[in-house]
Image: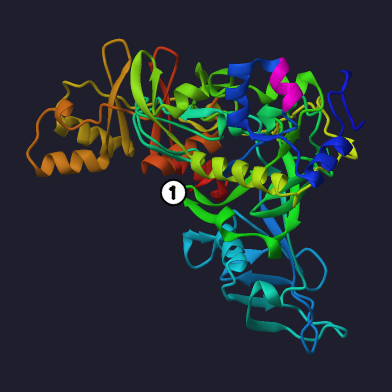
Protein backbone atom coordinates (compact mmCIF):
# COMPACT_ATOMS: atom_id res chain seq x y z
CA UNK A 1 0.00 0.00 0.00
CA UNK A 2 2.96 2.33 0.38
CA UNK A 3 3.41 4.81 3.20
CA UNK A 4 0.33 6.85 4.04
CA UNK A 5 -0.37 8.95 7.08
CA UNK A 6 -3.74 7.86 8.33
CA UNK A 7 -6.16 7.99 5.42
CA UNK A 8 -7.74 5.39 3.15
CA UNK A 9 -5.79 4.83 -0.04
CA UNK A 10 -7.11 5.91 -3.44
CA UNK A 11 -4.51 3.84 -5.31
CA UNK A 12 -1.16 2.14 -4.67
CA UNK A 13 2.25 2.69 -6.22
CA UNK A 14 2.04 -0.76 -7.77
CA UNK A 15 -1.30 0.04 -9.41
CA UNK A 16 0.04 3.32 -10.81
CA UNK A 17 3.24 1.72 -12.15
CA UNK A 18 1.22 -1.03 -13.84
CA UNK A 19 -0.85 1.64 -15.59
CA UNK A 20 2.38 3.40 -16.61
CA UNK A 21 3.61 0.13 -18.16
CA UNK A 22 0.36 -0.27 -20.08
CA UNK A 23 0.30 3.37 -21.12
CA UNK A 24 -2.97 3.92 -19.24
CA UNK A 25 -1.80 6.24 -16.47
CA UNK A 26 -3.61 9.56 -16.27
CA UNK A 27 -0.96 12.20 -15.64
CA UNK A 28 -1.42 15.96 -15.33
CA UNK A 29 0.95 18.76 -14.50
CA UNK A 30 0.20 20.62 -11.29
CA UNK A 31 -1.19 23.54 -13.32
CA UNK A 32 -3.47 21.25 -15.30
CA UNK A 33 -4.68 19.43 -12.21
CA UNK A 34 -5.49 22.65 -10.34
CA UNK A 35 -7.54 23.85 -13.33
CA UNK A 36 -9.28 20.49 -13.68
CA UNK A 37 -10.27 20.48 -10.01
CA UNK A 38 -11.88 23.90 -10.49
CA UNK A 39 -13.95 22.50 -13.36
CA UNK A 40 -14.78 18.97 -12.18
CA UNK A 41 -14.40 19.15 -8.40
CA UNK A 42 -11.76 17.58 -6.17
CA UNK A 43 -13.41 14.18 -5.67
CA UNK A 44 -13.93 13.46 -9.37
CA UNK A 45 -10.45 14.73 -10.31
CA UNK A 46 -8.76 12.71 -7.56
CA UNK A 47 -10.45 9.51 -8.75
CA UNK A 48 -9.52 10.08 -12.39
CA UNK A 49 -5.93 11.36 -12.14
CA UNK A 50 -3.12 9.06 -11.03
CA UNK A 51 -0.09 11.36 -10.90
CA UNK A 52 0.52 15.11 -10.74
CA UNK A 53 3.89 16.34 -12.00
CA UNK A 54 5.71 19.36 -10.61
CA UNK A 55 8.75 21.44 -11.44
CA UNK A 56 11.01 24.16 -10.15
CA UNK A 57 14.11 25.81 -11.60
CA UNK A 58 15.98 28.28 -9.48
CA UNK A 59 19.19 29.13 -7.67
CA UNK A 60 19.96 26.30 -5.25
CA UNK A 61 23.11 27.39 -3.48
CA UNK A 62 23.40 24.24 -1.37
CA UNK A 63 24.37 22.12 -4.37
CA UNK A 64 27.54 20.45 -5.53
CA UNK A 65 29.13 17.34 -6.97
CA UNK A 66 31.39 14.52 -5.76
CA UNK A 67 34.06 13.72 -8.33
CA UNK A 68 36.58 10.90 -8.56
CA UNK A 69 39.57 11.71 -10.77
CA UNK A 70 41.33 8.35 -10.74
CA UNK A 71 45.04 7.87 -9.93
CA UNK A 72 47.98 9.37 -11.80
CA UNK A 73 51.33 7.70 -12.37
CA UNK A 74 53.05 8.07 -9.96
CA UNK A 75 50.00 8.31 -7.65
CA UNK A 76 49.09 11.37 -5.68
CA UNK A 77 47.20 12.10 -2.47
CA UNK A 78 45.67 15.45 -3.40
CA UNK A 79 45.81 17.88 -0.51
CA UNK A 80 44.34 20.84 -2.39
CA UNK A 81 42.81 21.07 -5.84
CA UNK A 82 41.19 23.57 -8.17
CA UNK A 83 38.87 23.17 -11.16
CA UNK A 84 39.17 26.17 -13.49
CA UNK A 85 40.72 27.99 -10.49
CA UNK A 86 37.70 27.20 -8.29
CA UNK A 87 38.80 25.47 -5.07
CA UNK A 88 37.24 22.05 -4.46
CA UNK A 89 37.01 20.44 -1.03
CA UNK A 90 39.75 17.84 -0.54
CA UNK A 91 39.19 16.56 2.99
CA UNK A 92 38.41 13.19 1.41
CA UNK A 93 40.35 10.24 -0.02
CA UNK A 94 43.33 10.74 -2.33
CA UNK A 95 41.52 11.53 -5.59
CA UNK A 96 37.97 12.30 -4.42
CA UNK A 97 36.77 15.91 -4.24
CA UNK A 98 33.56 17.88 -3.70
CA UNK A 99 32.96 21.02 -5.76
CA UNK A 100 30.41 23.35 -4.17
CA UNK A 101 28.16 25.59 -6.25
CA UNK A 102 29.06 28.74 -4.29
CA UNK A 103 32.84 28.28 -4.30
CA UNK A 104 34.27 31.18 -6.30
CA UNK A 105 37.19 31.33 -8.72
CA UNK A 106 40.39 32.65 -7.21
CA UNK A 107 41.07 34.59 -10.42
CA UNK A 108 37.61 35.58 -11.70
CA UNK A 109 35.77 36.07 -8.40
CA UNK A 110 32.06 36.76 -8.76
CA UNK A 111 32.09 35.97 -12.48
CA UNK A 112 32.72 32.23 -12.17
CA UNK A 113 32.25 29.58 -9.51
CA UNK A 114 31.52 25.98 -8.69
CA UNK A 115 28.11 26.11 -10.36
CA UNK A 116 29.78 27.10 -13.62
CA UNK A 117 32.30 24.24 -13.28
CA UNK A 118 29.42 21.78 -12.93
CA UNK A 119 27.68 23.24 -15.98
CA UNK A 120 30.92 23.07 -17.97
CA UNK A 121 31.44 19.43 -17.04
CA UNK A 122 27.87 18.44 -17.96
CA UNK A 123 28.25 20.36 -21.24
CA UNK A 124 31.27 18.21 -22.16
CA UNK A 125 33.74 21.10 -21.96
CA UNK A 126 37.32 20.67 -20.84
CA UNK A 127 38.05 21.81 -17.30
CA UNK A 128 41.52 22.55 -15.98
CA UNK A 129 42.44 20.42 -12.95
CA UNK A 130 45.26 21.65 -10.75
CA UNK A 131 46.28 19.84 -7.58
CA UNK A 132 48.94 20.00 -4.86
CA UNK A 133 50.11 17.41 -2.35
CA UNK A 134 52.70 17.09 0.40
CA UNK A 135 53.90 13.71 -0.88
CA UNK A 136 54.09 10.40 0.94
CA UNK A 137 55.89 7.11 0.37
CA UNK A 138 52.76 5.59 -1.18
CA UNK A 139 51.63 8.81 -2.92
CA UNK A 140 54.89 10.53 -4.00
CA UNK A 141 53.54 12.99 -6.59
CA UNK A 142 53.35 16.59 -5.32
CA UNK A 143 51.88 18.60 -8.20
CA UNK A 144 49.46 18.05 -11.07
CA UNK A 145 48.16 20.22 -13.86
CA UNK A 146 45.96 18.73 -16.58
CA UNK A 147 42.62 19.00 -18.36
CA UNK A 148 39.63 16.73 -17.86
CA UNK A 149 36.12 16.24 -19.22
CA UNK A 150 33.25 14.51 -17.47
CA UNK A 151 34.03 11.34 -19.43
CA UNK A 152 37.49 11.21 -17.82
CA UNK A 153 35.93 10.94 -14.37
CA UNK A 154 35.18 7.58 -12.79
CA UNK A 155 32.22 9.00 -10.90
CA UNK A 156 30.49 12.37 -11.06
CA UNK A 157 27.62 12.49 -8.61
CA UNK A 158 25.44 15.55 -8.15
CA UNK A 159 24.69 15.61 -4.43
CA UNK A 160 22.77 18.60 -3.16
CA UNK A 161 22.30 18.96 0.62
CA UNK A 162 19.39 21.40 0.28
CA UNK A 163 17.12 21.87 -2.73
CA UNK A 164 13.49 22.66 -3.57
CA UNK A 165 12.35 24.74 -0.63
CA UNK A 166 8.70 24.21 0.23
CA UNK A 167 8.33 27.94 0.68
CA UNK A 168 10.45 31.00 -0.01
CA UNK A 169 9.93 34.47 1.42
CA UNK A 170 9.73 37.42 -0.96
CA UNK A 171 12.22 40.24 -0.39
CA UNK A 172 12.11 44.03 -0.25
CA UNK A 173 14.28 46.79 1.18
CA UNK A 174 13.29 49.62 3.53
CA UNK A 175 16.69 51.34 3.66
CA UNK A 176 17.87 54.33 1.67
CA UNK A 177 20.50 52.37 -0.26
CA UNK A 178 20.47 49.51 -2.77
CA UNK A 179 21.08 46.07 -1.25
CA UNK A 180 22.77 43.20 -3.06
CA UNK A 181 21.52 39.91 -1.63
CA UNK A 182 20.93 36.25 -2.50
CA UNK A 183 17.41 37.47 -3.32
CA UNK A 184 18.90 39.70 -6.00
CA UNK A 185 19.22 43.48 -6.14
CA UNK A 186 16.77 45.24 -3.83
CA UNK A 187 16.08 48.90 -4.53
CA UNK A 188 15.84 51.43 -1.67
CA UNK A 189 12.61 52.62 -0.05
CA UNK A 190 10.65 49.45 -0.94
CA UNK A 191 11.44 50.08 -4.60
CA UNK A 192 10.89 46.48 -5.72
CA UNK A 193 10.11 42.94 -4.56
CA UNK A 194 11.84 39.74 -5.63
CA UNK A 195 10.67 36.18 -5.05
CA UNK A 196 11.63 32.59 -5.73
CA UNK A 197 9.76 29.33 -6.20
CA UNK A 198 7.24 28.25 -8.83
CA UNK A 199 4.00 28.48 -6.86
CA UNK A 200 1.42 26.08 -8.27
CA UNK A 201 4.23 23.95 -9.74
CA UNK A 202 6.38 23.88 -6.59
CA UNK A 203 6.98 20.19 -5.71
CA UNK A 204 6.79 20.50 -1.93
CA UNK A 205 3.61 22.60 -2.08
CA UNK A 206 1.88 19.74 -3.87
CA UNK A 207 2.51 17.23 -1.07
CA UNK A 208 2.77 19.53 1.92
CA UNK A 209 2.22 16.67 4.35
CA UNK A 210 5.21 14.75 2.93
CA UNK A 211 3.10 11.63 2.41
CA UNK A 212 4.67 10.58 -0.91
CA UNK A 213 8.10 12.24 -0.81
CA UNK A 214 10.77 10.42 1.14
CA UNK A 215 14.01 8.50 1.02
CA UNK A 216 14.18 6.73 -2.34
CA UNK A 217 11.63 8.87 -4.21
CA UNK A 218 12.63 8.93 -7.89
CA UNK A 219 12.66 12.46 -9.32
CA UNK A 220 13.64 14.58 -12.31
CA UNK A 221 17.01 16.10 -11.42
CA UNK A 222 19.08 18.26 -13.73
CA UNK A 223 17.53 16.75 -16.84
CA UNK A 224 18.18 13.18 -15.70
CA UNK A 225 16.89 10.82 -13.07
CA UNK A 226 17.71 11.47 -9.44
CA UNK A 227 16.55 10.43 -6.00
CA UNK A 228 15.56 12.00 -2.73
CA UNK A 229 18.05 10.70 -0.17
CA UNK A 230 16.68 12.44 2.90
CA UNK A 231 15.50 15.67 4.41
CA UNK A 232 17.46 18.70 3.28
CA UNK A 233 19.48 20.83 5.63
CA UNK A 234 17.37 23.39 7.49
CA UNK A 235 14.30 21.19 6.88
CA UNK A 236 11.58 22.96 8.87
CA UNK A 237 8.15 21.68 7.79
CA UNK A 238 6.49 23.05 10.94
CA UNK A 239 6.98 26.54 9.49
CA UNK A 240 6.35 25.47 5.89
CA UNK A 241 10.05 25.41 5.00
CA UNK A 242 10.59 21.76 4.11
CA UNK A 243 13.67 20.94 2.01
CA UNK A 244 15.17 17.93 0.20
CA UNK A 245 18.57 16.30 -0.05
CA UNK A 246 18.93 14.85 -3.54
CA UNK A 247 21.44 13.00 -5.70
CA UNK A 248 21.86 11.82 -9.27
CA UNK A 249 24.39 10.76 -11.90
CA UNK A 250 25.90 13.96 -13.29
CA UNK A 251 27.00 12.10 -16.43
CA UNK A 252 23.36 11.55 -17.40
CA UNK A 253 22.19 15.11 -16.88
CA UNK A 254 21.52 17.96 -19.29
CA UNK A 255 23.15 21.41 -19.05
CA UNK A 256 19.80 22.96 -19.93
CA UNK A 257 18.68 22.13 -16.40
CA UNK A 258 21.96 22.83 -14.59
CA UNK A 259 23.16 26.41 -15.06
CA UNK A 260 26.00 28.15 -13.28
CA UNK A 261 25.05 31.68 -12.30
CA UNK A 262 26.40 34.78 -10.60
CA UNK A 263 24.20 36.88 -8.33
CA UNK A 264 25.40 40.45 -8.70
CA UNK A 265 27.67 41.51 -5.83
CA UNK A 266 26.63 38.47 -3.79
CA UNK A 267 28.27 35.34 -5.19
CA UNK A 268 27.97 32.32 -7.45
CA UNK A 269 25.39 29.55 -7.43
CA UNK A 270 23.84 26.78 -9.51
CA UNK A 271 20.37 26.86 -11.04
CA UNK A 272 18.96 23.34 -10.67
CA UNK A 273 15.91 21.79 -12.30
CA UNK A 274 13.91 19.55 -9.96
CA UNK A 275 10.64 17.80 -10.77
CA UNK A 276 8.77 15.39 -8.51
CA UNK A 277 5.84 13.14 -9.44
CA UNK A 278 3.07 13.25 -6.83
CA UNK A 279 0.99 10.03 -6.83
CA UNK A 280 -2.54 10.75 -5.66
CA UNK A 281 -2.59 8.02 -3.03
CA UNK A 282 -5.34 9.61 -0.90
CA UNK A 283 -7.66 12.61 -0.80
CA UNK A 284 -5.40 14.61 1.46
CA UNK A 285 -2.56 14.48 -1.06
CA UNK A 286 -5.03 15.27 -3.85
CA UNK A 287 -6.23 18.33 -1.95
CA UNK A 288 -2.76 19.83 -1.63
CA UNK A 289 -1.92 18.85 -5.22
CA UNK A 290 -4.92 20.97 -6.29
CA UNK A 291 -3.65 24.18 -4.66
CA UNK A 292 -3.59 27.15 -7.05
CA UNK A 293 -1.23 30.13 -7.07
CA UNK A 294 -3.80 32.13 -5.12
CA UNK A 295 -3.85 29.42 -2.43
CA UNK A 296 -0.08 29.40 -1.88
CA UNK A 297 1.07 32.15 0.47
CA UNK A 298 4.32 33.59 1.67
CA UNK A 299 5.52 36.82 3.28
CA UNK A 300 7.25 39.90 1.93
CA UNK A 301 10.20 40.40 4.26
CA UNK A 302 12.34 43.49 4.82
CA UNK A 303 15.94 42.59 4.01
CA UNK A 304 17.00 46.04 5.14
CA UNK A 305 16.97 44.71 8.71
CA UNK A 306 20.24 42.80 9.32
CA UNK A 307 18.73 40.09 11.49
CA UNK A 308 17.67 36.47 11.10
CA UNK A 309 14.24 37.62 12.32
CA UNK A 310 13.55 40.13 9.58
CA UNK A 311 10.16 41.82 9.88
CA UNK A 312 7.37 40.72 7.56
CA UNK A 313 5.70 43.57 5.68
CA UNK A 314 2.63 41.58 4.61
CA UNK A 315 1.41 38.22 3.35
CA UNK A 316 1.18 37.69 -0.39
CA UNK A 317 0.14 34.82 -2.67
CA UNK A 318 1.84 33.60 -5.81
CA UNK A 319 -0.90 34.88 -8.08
CA UNK A 320 -0.06 38.43 -7.04
CA UNK A 321 3.70 37.77 -7.13
CA UNK A 322 3.52 36.36 -10.66
CA UNK A 323 1.49 39.37 -11.83
CA UNK A 324 4.66 41.48 -11.81
CA UNK A 325 3.25 44.12 -9.45
CA UNK A 326 2.63 43.93 -5.71
CA UNK A 327 1.41 46.37 -3.07
CA UNK A 328 3.86 47.37 -0.34
CA UNK A 329 2.78 49.98 2.21
CA UNK A 330 -0.06 51.15 -0.04
CA UNK A 331 2.29 51.61 -3.01
CA UNK A 332 2.36 49.38 -6.09
CA UNK A 333 5.93 48.30 -6.88
CA UNK A 334 7.47 46.00 -9.52
CA UNK A 335 7.94 42.36 -8.61
CA UNK A 336 10.24 39.88 -10.37
CA UNK A 337 11.02 36.17 -10.02
CA UNK A 338 14.49 34.77 -9.41
CA UNK A 339 13.23 31.34 -10.49
CA UNK A 340 12.19 30.57 -14.05
CA UNK A 341 8.47 29.79 -14.24
CA UNK A 342 8.85 28.85 -17.89
CA UNK A 343 11.54 26.27 -17.08
CA UNK A 344 9.51 24.93 -14.14
CA UNK A 345 6.60 24.36 -16.52
CA UNK A 346 8.92 22.65 -19.01
CA UNK A 347 10.21 20.31 -16.28
CA UNK A 348 6.69 19.35 -15.20
CA UNK A 349 5.75 18.71 -18.84
CA UNK A 350 8.88 16.62 -19.43
CA UNK A 351 8.20 14.49 -16.37
CA UNK A 352 4.61 14.01 -17.54
CA UNK A 353 5.93 12.90 -20.95
CA UNK A 354 8.31 10.39 -19.35
CA UNK A 355 5.45 8.85 -17.38
CA UNK A 356 2.97 8.70 -20.24
CA UNK A 357 5.64 7.13 -22.50
CA UNK A 358 6.41 4.50 -19.88
CA UNK A 359 10.08 5.41 -19.41
CA UNK A 360 9.80 6.68 -15.82
CA UNK A 361 8.27 4.79 -12.90
CA UNK A 362 7.38 5.82 -9.39
CA UNK A 363 9.26 4.54 -6.37
CA UNK A 364 7.69 4.00 -2.99
CA UNK A 365 9.73 5.77 -0.28
CA UNK A 366 11.55 3.43 2.06
CA UNK A 367 11.17 6.10 4.72
CA UNK A 368 9.08 9.27 4.84
CA UNK A 369 10.65 12.58 5.74
CA UNK A 370 10.09 13.92 9.24
CA UNK A 371 7.37 16.51 9.71
CA UNK A 372 8.22 17.51 13.27
CA UNK A 373 11.79 18.73 12.82
CA UNK A 374 12.72 21.70 15.00
CA UNK A 375 14.95 24.20 13.21
CA UNK A 376 17.58 25.67 15.50
CA UNK A 377 19.55 28.83 14.72
CA UNK A 378 23.22 29.07 15.62
CA UNK A 379 23.68 30.86 18.91
CA UNK A 380 26.98 32.65 19.42
CA UNK A 381 28.14 31.43 22.81
CA UNK A 382 31.40 33.32 22.95
CA UNK A 383 30.91 36.73 24.53
CA UNK A 384 30.93 39.47 21.90
CA UNK A 385 32.20 42.96 22.82
CA UNK A 386 29.68 45.78 22.65
CA UNK A 387 29.90 49.43 21.71
CA UNK A 388 29.54 50.63 25.32
CA UNK A 389 32.82 48.85 26.18
CA UNK A 390 34.88 50.51 23.46
CA UNK A 391 33.38 53.95 22.75
CA UNK A 392 34.55 57.29 24.08
CA UNK A 393 31.90 58.67 26.44
CA UNK A 394 33.37 62.21 26.42
CA UNK A 395 32.48 63.57 23.02
CA UNK A 396 33.41 66.90 21.47
CA UNK A 397 30.27 68.29 19.82
CA UNK A 398 29.34 71.48 17.99
CA UNK A 399 26.19 73.37 16.96
CA UNK A 400 25.10 73.91 13.35
CA UNK A 401 25.59 77.66 13.73
CA UNK A 402 29.16 77.43 15.05
CA UNK A 403 31.96 79.11 13.07
CA UNK A 404 33.94 76.69 10.95
CA UNK A 405 37.31 78.11 12.04
CA UNK A 406 36.45 77.78 15.71
CA UNK A 407 35.40 74.16 15.18
CA UNK A 408 38.61 73.47 13.23
CA UNK A 409 40.67 74.78 16.14
CA UNK A 410 38.65 72.65 18.54
CA UNK A 411 39.33 69.61 16.39
CA UNK A 412 43.11 70.30 16.45
CA UNK A 413 43.26 71.13 20.16
CA UNK A 414 41.34 68.06 21.23
CA UNK A 415 43.05 65.72 18.75
CA UNK A 416 39.86 64.29 17.23
CA UNK A 417 38.76 63.57 13.66
CA UNK A 418 34.96 63.47 14.11
CA UNK A 419 32.69 66.09 15.62
CA UNK A 420 28.96 65.28 15.93
CA UNK A 421 26.70 68.28 15.35
CA UNK A 422 23.82 68.56 17.83
CA UNK A 423 20.90 70.89 18.50
CA UNK A 424 20.16 72.62 21.79
CA UNK A 425 18.77 69.37 23.27
CA UNK A 426 21.82 67.30 22.33
CA UNK A 427 20.00 65.55 19.49
CA UNK A 428 22.22 64.55 16.57
CA UNK A 429 21.63 66.59 13.42
CA UNK A 430 24.89 66.01 11.53
CA UNK A 431 28.59 65.27 11.67
CA UNK A 432 31.83 66.80 10.35
CA UNK A 433 35.26 65.25 9.97
CA UNK A 434 38.70 66.77 9.71
CA UNK A 435 38.51 66.24 5.95
CA UNK A 436 35.18 68.11 5.75
CA UNK A 437 36.64 71.07 7.63
CA UNK A 438 39.86 71.16 5.57
CA UNK A 439 37.81 71.20 2.37
CA UNK A 440 35.46 73.86 3.74
CA UNK A 441 38.30 76.17 4.73
CA UNK A 442 39.95 75.70 1.34
CA UNK A 443 36.69 76.70 -0.36
CA UNK A 444 36.07 79.65 1.95
CA UNK A 445 32.97 78.26 3.66
CA UNK A 446 31.91 79.95 6.91
CA UNK A 447 28.92 78.05 8.27
CA UNK A 448 29.11 74.56 9.70
CA UNK A 449 25.63 73.71 8.47
CA UNK A 450 26.85 74.13 4.89
CA UNK A 451 29.46 71.38 5.14
CA UNK A 452 28.16 68.91 7.70
CA UNK A 453 26.80 65.48 6.69
CA UNK A 454 23.14 65.40 7.68
CA UNK A 455 22.33 61.72 7.15
CA UNK A 456 24.53 60.19 9.82
CA UNK A 457 25.28 56.50 10.29
CA UNK A 458 25.05 55.77 14.02
CA UNK A 459 25.55 53.02 16.59
CA UNK A 460 23.71 52.03 19.76
CA UNK A 461 25.20 51.18 23.15
CA UNK A 462 24.50 47.46 22.81
CA UNK A 463 25.44 47.05 19.15
CA UNK A 464 28.13 44.45 18.53
CA UNK A 465 31.56 45.59 17.38
CA UNK A 466 31.15 43.34 14.33
CA UNK A 467 28.07 45.32 13.27
CA UNK A 468 29.95 48.60 13.71
CA UNK A 469 32.85 47.34 11.60
CA UNK A 470 30.37 46.23 8.95
CA UNK A 471 28.84 49.73 8.83
CA UNK A 472 32.27 51.35 8.59
CA UNK A 473 33.21 49.09 5.70
CA UNK A 474 29.85 49.47 3.93
CA UNK A 475 29.77 53.28 4.07
CA UNK A 476 33.55 53.82 3.88
CA UNK A 477 33.67 55.80 7.14
CA UNK A 478 35.91 55.63 10.19
CA UNK A 479 33.69 56.78 13.05
CA UNK A 480 30.09 56.59 14.30
CA UNK A 481 28.29 58.71 16.89
CA UNK A 482 26.65 56.58 19.57
CA UNK A 483 23.07 57.68 20.24
CA UNK A 484 20.24 56.76 22.60
CA UNK A 485 16.66 56.05 21.59
CA UNK A 486 16.02 59.81 21.23
CA UNK A 487 19.09 60.25 19.00
CA UNK A 488 20.93 62.18 21.69
CA UNK A 489 24.68 61.79 21.38
CA UNK A 490 26.13 59.76 24.24
CA UNK A 491 29.43 58.62 22.75
CA UNK A 492 31.64 58.15 19.72
CA UNK A 493 33.30 55.00 18.39
CA UNK A 494 36.06 55.05 15.77
CA UNK A 495 38.20 52.55 13.90
CA UNK A 496 41.14 53.65 16.06
CA UNK A 497 39.18 52.79 19.21
CA UNK A 498 38.44 49.32 17.90
CA UNK A 499 42.00 48.76 16.71
CA UNK A 500 43.61 50.02 19.90
CA UNK A 501 41.33 48.43 22.49
CA UNK A 502 40.49 45.17 20.79
CA UNK A 503 42.14 43.37 17.85
CA UNK A 504 43.04 44.10 14.29
CA UNK A 505 40.76 41.28 13.18
CA UNK A 506 37.73 43.49 13.79
CA UNK A 507 38.83 45.90 11.09
CA UNK A 508 37.51 45.51 7.53
Question: Front-most of 207 and 501?
Answer: 207
Identify the image quadrant of residue 307.
Answer: top right
Q: Front-most of 318 and 505?
A: 318
- Seen in the picture, residue 155 relative to 246 is either above or below; the reply is below
Q: Relative to the observer, which residue lies in front, 68 or 484? A: 68
Q: Position of residue 113 (x, y in %)?
A: 55, 60
Q: What residue is rendered at 80% in x and 45% in y?
A: 22
Give the colour scheme of this rendering: rainbow
Which residue in the structure is indicated by mark 1?
A: 265
Determine the residue positioned at 51% across, 45% down: 499
Residue 88 placed where, x, y %? 67, 64
Name the spot of residue 85 as percent of width and height, x first: 56, 70
Q: Say few, some or many: other residues with alpha carbon within 10 Å of mark 1 (under 14 / 14 to 19 / 20 or more).
A: some
Which one is nearer the viewer's eye here, 184 or 414? 184
* Part of the protein shown in magenta: 43-48
For the residue labelled by badge 1, is the local secondary structure a helix, a strand or a loop?
A: loop
Is residue 468 shown to the viewer in this render? yes
Relative side of 228 to 197, left or right: right
Instruction: Tell me where residue 216 sits by quadrant.
Output: top right
Report if residue 260 lies within the magenta region: no
Q: Is residue 485 above or below residue 363?
A: above
Amino acid sequence: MGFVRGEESLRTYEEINEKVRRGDAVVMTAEEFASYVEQAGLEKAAKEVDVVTTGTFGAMCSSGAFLNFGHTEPPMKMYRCWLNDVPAYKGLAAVDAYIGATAMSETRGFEYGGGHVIEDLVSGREVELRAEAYGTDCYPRKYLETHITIEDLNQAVLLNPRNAYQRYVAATNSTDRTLYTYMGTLLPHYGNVTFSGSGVLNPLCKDSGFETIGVGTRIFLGGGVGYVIGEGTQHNPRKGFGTLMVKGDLKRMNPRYLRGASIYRYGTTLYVGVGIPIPLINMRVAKTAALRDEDIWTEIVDYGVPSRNRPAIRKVNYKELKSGRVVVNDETVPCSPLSSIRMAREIAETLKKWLTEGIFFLTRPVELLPTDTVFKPLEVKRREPRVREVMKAEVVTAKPTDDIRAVAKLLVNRGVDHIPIVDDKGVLVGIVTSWDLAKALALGKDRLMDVMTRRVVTAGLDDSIDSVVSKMSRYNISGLPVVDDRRRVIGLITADDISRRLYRRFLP
